[in-house]
Image: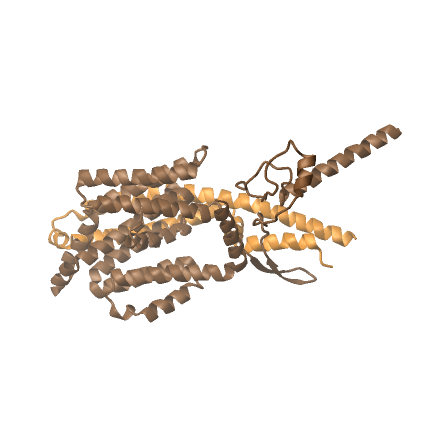
């Protein structure tokens, strides 16, 4: 039989699942460490892509001088300098990423807690109906 | 004021019932204006400069997620720049990619600001953006606002330097690269504007969060004033040659616009009609949930009272015989004994009546005992 309370509850839950809940449910399926680890891995890849793009732009900007001095420059020194810059800026970016995803995970968990409470309420309503 | 509140309620109701049509229409307008402005500002690729193409793409955008509009606008501008010179397109592409890869994965909702900032710059009211983002965003929105400002000034630099880019057409790609990148790095107006917008955004954000009356209005006005002052100081110190009058006029208009937005858009729960589908073991449910109307628009009712009775019964009570009361705070009250109450007040009085009857019942029981 149709139960009005149950339909209202299910409508709220379905609306949550379709909107803001969609991402939260996906986040909630991970353990905190796994989720943050995966996001940090993505951050490393993204940062590397961005770094390569910026370095390419810098080289093109000074392409003439770069090609002229390429035999004079100490390539090992240049490489070391690049790696140092890459690592230093990567540490900053990864720290920001960690803080952002830590916060996002906690927010998602808080939001999901409410959702799970509704699930419990729903199962209670079903149990009550089956008893009748 | 009451009329405005009523209008707000009507808008809310209208949106709640017709959200399914309003959201695509708004997306269409945003895409259409953005693409038209991009065409008018850049417009180097003649194939894209047709109203029909803009119309078709905008119609497509109206049914796609809002972030797709940003991607399409970016592709549009890149194609125009490519038609002008490959180098400028390459520089702008790298900037777009770095922004998307590094920042927008953190806050995809802010992406629309990058599109709106250049659009509002072209409409000469860019000051709406830092104030608005201070009101509804966080200080992290500085990144997206600054990116929007930078993109506008890059386009501006490229359009003013078309002659240079065309002159070195002989193949000196490095010179073109240098021209575009130098234009970005040495653009003092851009740096001053980014600084002014960043300070404004942070100031608006902190004032808005203060626990004082009218904090939102204070934040809007203070933000607008600080924005103008920083732009003026920047003009004096760095000699940016920006028009002071335009800045003041633009800020005043922007403050007005943000005030309107604050009243009609922010702080208003535009809950929409939800259409959801789900199932359990017994049924498939196709539910349409329409939001309830929280406040009623005033119903004008006039109650006439016999003047003779008023004179005889309530000689000491004077005042108008008719009054209206609505659920809103701004409703007018007149000193009268015949005021009508609607909405929640009725339920409160009903509640108090119920309590009184309960007390009498208890007293009866006690007396019986």
Tell me the residue at 27%/43% (across/down). Answer: B248
Q: So how many labels did they put on this image? A: 0
Tell me the residue at 37%/46% (across/down). Answer: B256
> Whole-percent x and y of residue B18?
52, 60
Q: Nearer the viewer, residue B14 or A23?
A: B14
> Whole-percent x and y of residue B231?
25, 41
Q: Nearer the viewer, residue B164 or B245?
A: B245
> Whole-percent x and y of residue B178?
16, 54
Tell me the residue at 33%/59% (across/down). Answer: B34
Q: Residue furthest right?
A: B368
> Whole-percent x and y of residue B307?
65, 41
Chain B's colour?
Answer: brown
Chain A's colour?
Answer: orange
Picture quadrant of residue B164: bottom left
Q: Nearer the viewer, residue B73 or B82?
A: B73
Q: Nearer the viewer, residue A31 or B131?
A: B131
């Amino acid at each position: 039989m149709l139960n009005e309370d149950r339909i209202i509850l299910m409508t709220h839950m379905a609306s949550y699942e379709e909107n803001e809940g969609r991402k939260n449910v996906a986040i909630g399926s991970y353990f905190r460490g796994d989720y943050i680890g995966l996001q940090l891995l993505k951050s490393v890849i993204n940062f590397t892509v961005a770094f390569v793009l910026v370095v390419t732009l810098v080289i093109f900007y000074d392409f003439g001088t770069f090609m002229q001095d390429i035999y004079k420059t100490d390539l090992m020194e240049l490489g070391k300098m690049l790696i140092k810059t890459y690592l230093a800026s990567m540490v900053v970016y990864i720290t920001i990423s960690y803080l952002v995803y830590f916060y996002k995970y906690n927010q998602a968990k808080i939001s999901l807690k409410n959702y799970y409470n509704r699930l419990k309420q729903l199962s209670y309503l079903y149990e009550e109906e089956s008893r009748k | 004021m009451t009329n405005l509140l009523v209008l707000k309620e009507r808008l809310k109701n209208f949106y709640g019932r017709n959200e399914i049509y309003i959201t695509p229409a708004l997306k269409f307008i945003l895409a259409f204006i953005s693409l038209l402005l991009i065409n008018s500002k850049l417009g180097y690729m003649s194939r894209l400069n047709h109203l029909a193409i803009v119309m078709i793409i905008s119609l497509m955008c109206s049914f796609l997620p809002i972030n797709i509009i940003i991607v399409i606008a970016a592709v549009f501008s890149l194609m125009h720049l490519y038609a002008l010179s490959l180098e400028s397109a390459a520089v702008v592409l790298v900037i777009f990619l770095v922004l998307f890869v590094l920042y927008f994965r953190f806050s995809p909702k802010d992406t629309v600001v990058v599109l709106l900032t250049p659009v509002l710059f072209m409409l000469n009211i860019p000051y709406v953006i830092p104030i608005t983002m201070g009101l509804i965003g966080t200080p992290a929105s500085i990144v997206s606002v600054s990116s929007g400002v930078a993109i506008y000034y890059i386009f501006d630099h490229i359009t003013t330097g078309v002659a240079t880019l065309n002159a070195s057409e002989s193949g000196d790609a490095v010179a073109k690269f240098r021209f575009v990148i130098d234009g970005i790095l040495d653009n003092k107006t851009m740096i001053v504007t980014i600084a002014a917008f960043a300070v404004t955004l942070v100031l608006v954000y902190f004032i808005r969060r203060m626990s004082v009356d009218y904090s939102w209005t204070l934040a809007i006005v203070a933000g607008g004033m600080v924005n103008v002052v920083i732009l003026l100081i920047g003009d004096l110190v760095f000699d940016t040659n920006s028009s002071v009058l335009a800045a003041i006029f633009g800020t005043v208009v922007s403050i007005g616009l943000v005030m309107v937005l604050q009243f009609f858009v922010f702080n208003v729960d535009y809950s929409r009609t939800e259409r959801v589908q789900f199932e359990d073991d017994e049924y498939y449910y196709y539910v349409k949930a329409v939001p309830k109307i929280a406040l009623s628009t005033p119903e004008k009712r006039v109650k006439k009272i016999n003047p003779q009775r008023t004179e005889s019964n309530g000689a000491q009570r004077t005042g108008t015989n008719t009054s209206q009361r609505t659920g809103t705070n701004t409703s007018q009250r007149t000193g009268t004994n015949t005021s009508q109450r609607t909405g929640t007040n009725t339920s409160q009085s009903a509640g108090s009546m119920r309590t009184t009857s309960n007390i009498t019942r208890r007293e009866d029981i006690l007396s019986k005992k």
